Amino acid sequence: MRQATRVLALCAGLLAAAAPAAKTPAHAPVPEESALSYPSRPITLVVTFPPGGGTDLLARRLGSWLERDLGQPVVIENRAGASGNIGAQAVARAPADGYTLLMVNSSYAVNPGVFRDLGFSPERDLKGVVNIGFVPSVLVTSARSSWSSLQQVLDGDAQSDKGVAYASCGNGTPQHLAGEMLGRRAGGKWLHVPYRGCGPALTDVLAGNVPLGMVTASSAMPFIQAGSLRALAVTAPRRSAFLPEVPTVAEQGFPGYELDQWHGILAPASTPPAVVDKLSAAVNAVLGRQEVMNDLRALGYSVAGGDPDAFQDLILRDIARFAELTGQIGLRID
C-alpha cells in the first residue's frame, strides 16, 4: 500500500511538472517597476479611422513629437471600422504594458448609446490617458455648389421630396449625430451617407458625389483654405478662430445647437498608473510648446491637455450625455 501511495505521488508530481505554466492574461498589468525604464521599445498608437481624416492627422503629428521626447518610435496603426469599435476592441484586449495605445475622438463616447454590443466595456476595459484637444465639425459643400449658406441648403431641402444627402465620417460618429440633430431641428429630410472616416467622406464631397459633408474642421481645413470646399456652418458653440467668417449652426436659426469633439489617448485599464502618468506627462509637455500649439490651432484644434482622471471623467460624462441624445432621436446602429 505504501509503495502504491509513493507511486501515485510520484506520478502526480511528474504530471504537475509537465503541465504548462499558467499564462498571464493579456490584459493583466505589467510589474510597476517596469515603468522606471518605460518606454524601452516602440509604441503602437492605434487610430480608429482610416488615413487622411482629422484623427489620423493628429495621431501622426503627435507621434512624431513624442518620438523625440520618449526616444522610441511611435508606430501609427489604422484599424478602421464599426465607428471605431474594431480598433478600440483590439486595444482593450492588448497587453496592459503601455506599448499599445488608442487614439479616439468623441465617437468613442457616442458608440455605447448606439451599438448594442461594442465587444468591450468603455468603463472597465480602457481608461483615459490625456485629452489632446477639441475640434468642431463643419458642414461643407463643394466649391462648385450653388450653396453659400445653411439657409440656402434648408430652403432647397424644403422644396425637394427626396431631401438632401450628407456624408459623415461613419455611423455613430459625432458628425453623424451632428447631421441628425440638424436635420431634425430643421424639420427637413436629410439622408445620411456614412463613410469609413472623414477622409473618404471628403473625397466624395469634393467630387460632387454627395452634396454635403459633415466632417471635422481639421480634416476639411486644407480644402477650405485651398478653395475647393465651402464651409457653411460650424457645430461648436462659438465661431472657430480659424474660420471666423463661418457662422455657427446656432447663429443660423438654431439656438442651443452645439456638438464639439475631443480627441485623446486611452490605454488598457490595467496599465500601471506610473506608466499612464508618464505618458500623460509626456503628451502634456508636448502640448505646452508654442510651436505645437500653433500647429494644432492651424488644424482647427483648441489644445486641452490635463490629467488622466479628468479625461476619464469627461469620457464618462459624454457617454451619458450622448446616450440621452441618441435615445431622443432614436439612433441605433444594430
Image: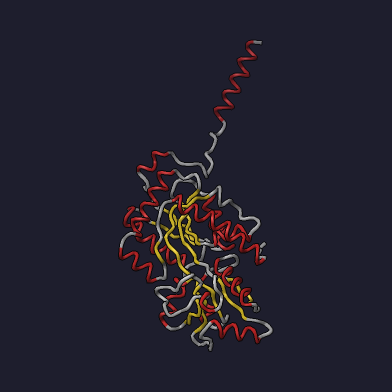
Residue 189 % position (x, y): 65, 78
Q: Residue at x 39, y 63 (%)?
A: 303
Residue 304 % position (x, y): 41, 60
Q: Is residue 186 visible?
A: yes
Q: Residue at x 67, y 61 (%)?
A: 334
Q: Nearer the viewer, residue 128 or 268?
A: 128
Asked which quadrant contains residue 290, the reply is bottom left
Residue 6 % position (x, y): 60, 15
Vertical position of residue 28 compared to residue 108: above or below: above
Residue 120 % position (x, y): 59, 51
Taking the view exactly as shown, the residue that stands out farthest to the top is 2
Say whether residue 290 is left or right of residue 102.
left
Q: Residue at x 62, y 81 (%)?
A: 164
Tell me the quadrant of the picture where the N terminus can be found. top right
Vertical position of residue 191 compared to residue 87: above or below: below
Q: Nearer the viewer, residue 203 or 175?
A: 175
Asked which quadrant contains residue 318, the reply is bottom right
Q: Residue at x 41, y 80 (%)?
A: 225
Q: Nearer the viewer, residue 73 or 238?
A: 238
Q: Is residue 202 visible?
A: no
Q: How many marks?
A: 0
Taking the view exactly as shown, the residue that stands out farthest to the front is 255
